[in-house]
Image (cartoon, grey):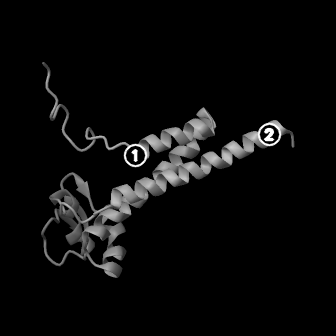
Amino acid sequence: MTSERQSQASTRHLSGRLAVAAACVFIFLASYRIELPGLYYDEMDFVNAAQGAPDNTFIYERLGPVPVLINPYLGALKAWLYAPIFRLFGVSPVTVRLPAILLAAVTLLILYGAMRDTLGSAWAAIVVWIMAVEPSKSISQPAGFGARLC
C-alpha cells in the first residue's frame, strides 16, 4: 500500500468516525429534555390505534378489528410499528419521540454513505455535521413565519 492510499484510507476512517460522532451529537441534542414542551396533537393521533384501538378515537376505518386509517388521509402504519414499543415501555414522550430521533440519526449515516461516494468522505462528514447540528426553524414553522420584509 502506498503512502497516498494509506492517507486516503485514514481520511476515510476518520471521516466515518466523525459521521458517527455527528449522529451521536444529533441524538443528544434532539433528546435533551425530550419531555418538553409536552406532546402535541400530531404526535398523539396514532397512539389509540397502536394500543389496539379500544375505542374509535382517531380511527377512521378498520379492516375487521385492525385499524387501517387514522384519518381519511393518514394510514395506520406508524401505529403498527409503534405498537410493540408501547406494549414494552408504555406511552410517554420518550417512547413517542425517541424512535423518530433514532431513525433520523440512522438517516444521517445513510446520507453520509451516499454522499461519500459522490463528494468524498471529508465533504460528506462536513455535510452530516451541518445537518446534525443545524437548528433550522424553517422545518418546524410555516413558510414566512416570523419573516418580515422591510
Residue at image position (73%, 40%) is 8
Label 2, label 1: how far apart the Cα atoms are: 31 Å
Residue at image position (13%, 26%) is 148
Identify which amino acid the numbered label 1 is placed on.
Val
Image quadrant in which you'd find residue 136: top left
Look at the picture and state if 126 lies above or below 24.
above
Is 75 on the left-hand or right-hand side of 146?
right
Look at mark 1 in the image and give the residue it sits on: 133
Look at the picture and state if 59 lies above or below 88.
above
Q: Which SS class for mark 1?
A: helix
Residue at image position (79%, 43%) is 6
Identify which amino acid the numbered label 2 is placed on.
Arg
Look at mark 2 in the image and give the residue it sits on: 5
Picture coordinates of residue 146, whole percent (x, y): 15, 34
Pointer 2 and pointer 1: residues touching (CB < 8 Å)?
no
Q: Quadrant of the N terminus?
A: top right
Q: Which SS class for mark 2?
A: helix
Q: Nearer the viewer, residue 106 or 133?
A: 133
Decide: few, some or many residues near mark 1? Use Cα within 10 Å; few <14, some 14-19, many ≥20.
Answer: some
Picture coordinates of residue 122, whole percent (x, y): 60, 38
- Sequence order check: which comes first, mark 2 or mark 1? 2
Picture coordinates of residue 76, whole percent (x, y): 28, 62
Residue at image position (30%, 63%) is 97
Image quadrant in which you'd find residue 77: bottom left
